[in-house]
Amino acid sequence: MLPLIKRIDSHVHFYTSQDLRRVAGSLPYTLPEPHPLTAYLDTLINAGIVPTLLNNVHLSILPDSENVFASFEELRNLQAANPQRYGGVRLVGTIKAEPAYATQERLSHPQVIGARIVLHDARPETVADTQFCDEQWLMFYARLLPHQHLHIYAKEAETNRRVLRQIPRDVRVIIDHLGTCHSERDITEPAYIALLTEARERGNVWFKGPGYRTSVHPEETARFVTQIVCAVGADKILLEATDAPHVGTDNKGVPYSDLFDLSKAFNFVDAVAHHVSEETRIPADQLLHGAFGQLIYAHAPTLR
């Protein structure tokens, strides 16, 4: 029997063929394959990996986050049918951060831990100064509960910073993909330094992996993580994530799905944490998931 390995996945996407049919023909690229929760869990469990906490994050190609709510029901049904196999899994979700969608009712669901702004490769100059701080957005931020956070995804460090500066300072923020998807600009990029400075001054900003969208080379990604640790703090990093099902391509056009599966994604973050730990003497486990425990377990201890 394989030894059991406990894992957290702080960023994963679960959706079905039914979800994809809603956007079929409306996107300028081929749709990804479905990535249902049950198949994901069975893949890990059959490999001797015990998923203890999962975060189903809003998928940008979908118009809403109904797939996130559906995954809560899917897990409940699995646990009712086979509690021994699935009973130890805890599932939370991050929904679409759109004021009209992220209503009081949706945010009050006990498994919703936050909401996500998705900007992809938006250039900084396309982010208007008041785009995320008008009356509707301010009302949305006020609806966020104490254990919930705002999640920002933009490939450009300066785009992330321009959004961050519009968020009320009492709102906790998680920034995707270590704050930049442009490793070629190096950790000395002025915009990146400015983003880390802004995060340090706020004191409630976390940076999340897995980091392969920054660079597919663990030692290169580790340089960015070390920079975050030095500038913002070791308690503000979270690496243990797969970003499954690994859609998109790297900067050379190689599909991430050719480079990663679930096992390889976990191996990647382990390698990054190892490199950073050697450099900083900070335990790898803390870099992998310590921040997520702080964000989720400490603030929402009754989640099921």
Image: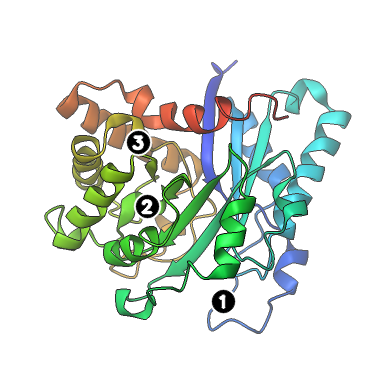
Which residue, given by chain and number where applicable, does mark 1 sit on? 30
Label 1, secondary structure: give it. Answer: loop
Q: Is residue 237 left or right of residue 118?
A: left
Q: Quadrant of residue 49?
A: top right
Q: Residue furthest front?
A: 135
Residue at mark 3 to residue at mark 1: CA–CA distance: 35 Å
Residue at mark 2 to residue at mark 3: CA–CA distance: 13 Å
Dot 2 and dot 3 residues touching (CB under 8 Å) = no
Label 2, secondary structure: give it. Answer: helix
Discs 3/1, front: 3
Q: Amino acid at mark 1?
A: Thr
Q: Is residue 285 above or below residue 24?
A: above
Q: Is residue 13 visible?
A: no
The front one of 131 and 74 is 131
Q: Amino acid at mark 2?
A: His
Which residue, given by chain and number where applicable, does mark 2 sit on? 177
Label 3, secondary structure: give it. Answer: helix
Give coordinates of residue 14: x percent, y percent. Answer: 65, 52
